[in-house]
Amino acid sequence: MSERTVLPPRRTGELSHLLSALNDTAGGAQPALVARDGSRIELPDELFEVLQDVATALSQGMAITVAPQHTVLTTSETAELLGVSRPTVVRLLESGEIPYEQPGRHRRLRLADVLAYQQRRRRSRAAGLDEMVHESEEDGIYDLPDDAVTQRSSDLSRED
């Protein structure tokens, strides 16, 4: 299976019935699909949640990309996922930032560990930006001088 992008239907309102059925929690029965031959196949919770997410996004006019992921990644796959070079991934592994196993010559990383690192990195960046804004505000970088005249851009267009 390869990566696949699905565009929303032209009339997203057609998904409202499906979305209602997927979001209906009354009854508590195990979600299931009915096959073409009429047989009932129970869905694992993970697959059902993915179907809910897909139906919701499509009903809001968004496209969906389905990309299978191995649960164990190579350093090259990890580099592609993180948007960094393979040597950078190797440095992260050797510094202990991301755990890995090395059963033979090649390092193997769990997808969950890579995603956890990615989330930590995002939080760290956000915290750094928050700190920069806080320090800038304390230093008065955003303060205007007392004699400053402010004018909206919409006011400027009226002067023409």
Image: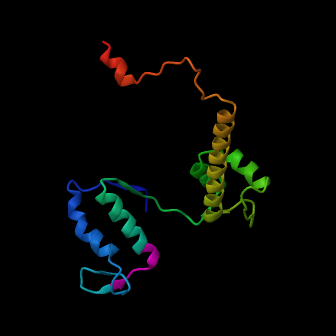
Provide residue 52's location: percent of width, then percent of height: 37, 69
Q: Where the N terminus falls, by quadrant? A: bottom left
Q: Residue at x 35, y 53 (%)?
A: 63
Provide residue 137's location: percent of width, then percent of height: 64, 35
Q: Where the C terminus falls, by quadrant? A: top left
Residue 57 position by quadrant: bottom left
Numbered label tally:
0
| Position of residue 124 in the picture relative to residue 81 (left or right) | right
Color scheme of the displayed model: rainbow
Image vertical order of residue 158 relative to residue 4, above or below: above
Work out which residue is located at the far front of the displayed protein and give it. 146
- In the image, the segment drawn in magenta is 41-47
Q: Residue at x 57, y 52 (%)?
A: 81
Q: Residue at x 24, y 79 (%)?
A: 36
Residue 56 position by quadrant: bottom left
Q: Residue at x 60, y 29 (%)?
A: 142
In this orientation, which residue lies closer to the viewer: 85 or 132? Answer: 132
Provide residue 95's location: percent of width, then percent of height: 79, 53
Image vertical order of residue 130 relative to residue 143, above or below: below
Provide residue 132's location: percent of width, then percent of height: 67, 38
In this orientation, which residue lies closer to the viewer: 109 or 132? Answer: 132
| Position of residue 33 in the picture relative to residue 84 (left or right) | left
In this orientation, which residue lies closer to the viewer: 41 or 53? Answer: 53
Does the segment drawn in magenta span residue 3? no
Work out which residue is located at the far top of the displayed protein and give it. 160
